[in-house]
């Protein structure tokens, strides 16, 4: 049985924006556990999701990731879905810089003798008025189009990066996902759809 390690932010964590103090959806409703259940006997699924996580391009966070992956070995597939917080957490969203940071992360992972790497373009950014009432969205309503445009550019650049680096790519921005009231975090239905889409991705690897 092969092992996949998913590394991401609050949507990998299973964050429920309606909960208090970092609430999470029940285990069975998180997409990572849906994948684990759907591929039982084929893939072992490990995951490290953290709300607010941005792409670690250097320093302690990148060292943490390397240490975590060494501890999880043997790992057959490293899958990363990050970039949303890099865009939403700043008043100067920059898909080009975010892609450079992802390139540095991938370079680090490539030193760890993991057979395959999967880069996942995160869900599309399509914010609503309620989105800007959340503390994790830095701008105001006037930034909605800017964030959406940079999110689309990030998907395009991630696809090119995956091709250039010779790694696998999945585009979650093209999936018919459902979101909670903030339009940033997956709803329970969104987790179900995401999990089923990811099962199909892994079955093809």
Image (tube, grey):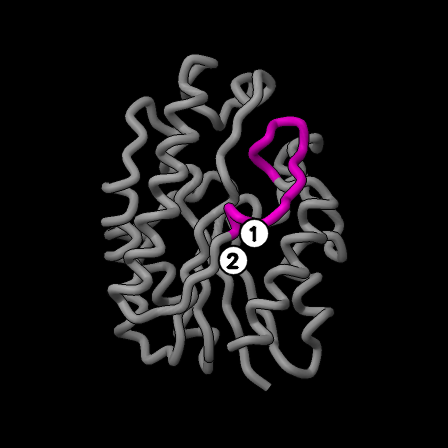
Say the numbered circle drawn on residue 49. none
Gap between marks 1 and 2, in whole Å?
7 Å
Asked if the residue under mark 2 is in contact with the one under mark 1, i.e. CB atoms within 8 Å, the reply is: yes
Farthest residue, direction bottom: 1
- Say if the magenta span includes residue 33: no
Query: What residue appears at the point 30 percent right and 71 percent down from the top-left corner?
Result: 166
Q: Which residues are magenta?
A: 172-185
Q: Is residue 34 above or below residue 187?
A: below
Query: What residue appears at the point 56 percent right and 72 percent down from the top-left corner?
Result: 202
Say the numbered circle drawn on residue 48. 2
Q: Name the secondary structure under disc 2.
A: strand
Compare residues 63 and 179 and report the one nearer the observer. Answer: 179
Q: Mark 1 or mark 2, which is nearer to you?
A: 1
Query: What residue appears at the point 52 percent right and 51 percent down from the top-left corner?
Result: 172
Compare residues 67 and 188 and report the one nearer the observer. Answer: 188
Q: Is residue 38 above or below residue 88?
A: below
Query: What residue appears at the point 67 percent right and 33 percent down from the top-left corner?
Result: 180
Measured from the top left, where is residue 158 in percent x and y?
34, 52
Q: Which residue is mark 1?
A: 12
Q: In the shown orientation, is residue 135 left or right of residue 15?
A: left
Measured from the top left, where is residue 124 in percent x and y?
50, 40
Q: In the shown orientation, is residue 43 left or right of residue 159?
A: right
């Amino acid at each position: 049985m092969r092992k996949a390690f998913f590394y991401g932010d609050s949507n990998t964590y299973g964050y429920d924006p309606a909960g208090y103090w970092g609430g999470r959806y029940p285990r069975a409703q998180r997409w990572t556990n849906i994948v684990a259940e759907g591929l039982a006997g084929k893939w072992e699924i490990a995951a490290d999701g953290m709300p607010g996580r941005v792409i670690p391009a250097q320093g302690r966070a990148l060292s943490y990731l390397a240490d975590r992956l060494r501890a999880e070995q043997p790992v057959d597939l490293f899958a990363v879905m990050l970039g949303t917080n890099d865009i939403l957490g700043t008043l100067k969203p920059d898909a080009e810089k975010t892609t450079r940071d992802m390139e540095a992360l991938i370079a680090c992972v490539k030193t760890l003798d993991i057979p395959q790497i999967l880069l996942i373009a995160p869900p599309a950014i399509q914010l609503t008025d309620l989105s800007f009432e959340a503390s994790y969205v830095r701008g105001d309503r006037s930034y909605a189009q800017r964030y959406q445009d940079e999110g689309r550019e990030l998907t395009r650049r991630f696809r090119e990066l995956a091709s250039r680096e010779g790694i696998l790519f999945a585009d979650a921005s093209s999936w018919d996902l459902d979101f909670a009231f903030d339009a940033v975090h997956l709803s329970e239905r969104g987790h179900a759809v995401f999990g089923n889409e990811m099962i199909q991705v892994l079955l093809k690897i």
